[in-house]
Image: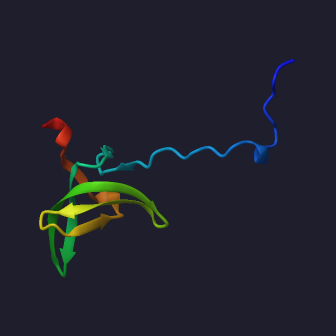
Amino acid sequence: MTYEPPSDPSQQSAQQPGPITAFDFLGKQIKAGMAVCYPVRRGSRMWLKKMTVLAVQDTPQGVCVSGTNDAGRRVSIRNLDKCVIVDTKESK
């Protein structure tokens, strides 16, 4: 006699979701510790700012990357197709 798992999905244990992944404009995976540049706009002026990623989170609005910029302020980026990885601690 062999064991057969229950065919009813309600009796099976829930699967754990995989890790949350985020990708930049070039399709590279964003991880904690990486430096990312993102666009900033104030009026008609536009420039790039750099932030260090602290966490990749899943929010009701979608995947969000949070960290601190060069001035030490907390930053959250939700529009990830506009940012790009510029430096990683792994390459040093």
In percent of width and height, residue 25 lies at 30, 51
The quarter of the picture where the N terminus appears is: top right
The picture quadrant where one finds residue 11 is: top right
Q: How many labels does the image show?
A: 0
**At x 12% / y 68%, what residue is drawn?**
71
- With respect to residue 76, does 88 lie above or below? above
Picture quadrant where residue 19 is located? top left
Give the residue displayed 20% in from the left and 74% down from the top.
41
Residue at position x 83%, y 20% in the image: 2
Can you tell which quarter of the image residue 39 is in?
bottom left
The percent coordinates of residue 92 (x first, y second) are 12, 37
For this rendering, which residue is in front, 88 or 25? 88
**Where does the image place residue 5, in percent across and percent down from the top left?**
78, 32
In the image, 39 versus 50, the foreground residue is 50
Q: In the image, residue 22 lies at what x, y percent?
A: 37, 50
Residue pushed farthest top?
1
Give the left or right position of residue 51, taking residue 23 as reference. left
Residue at point 33%, 55% (across, down): 55
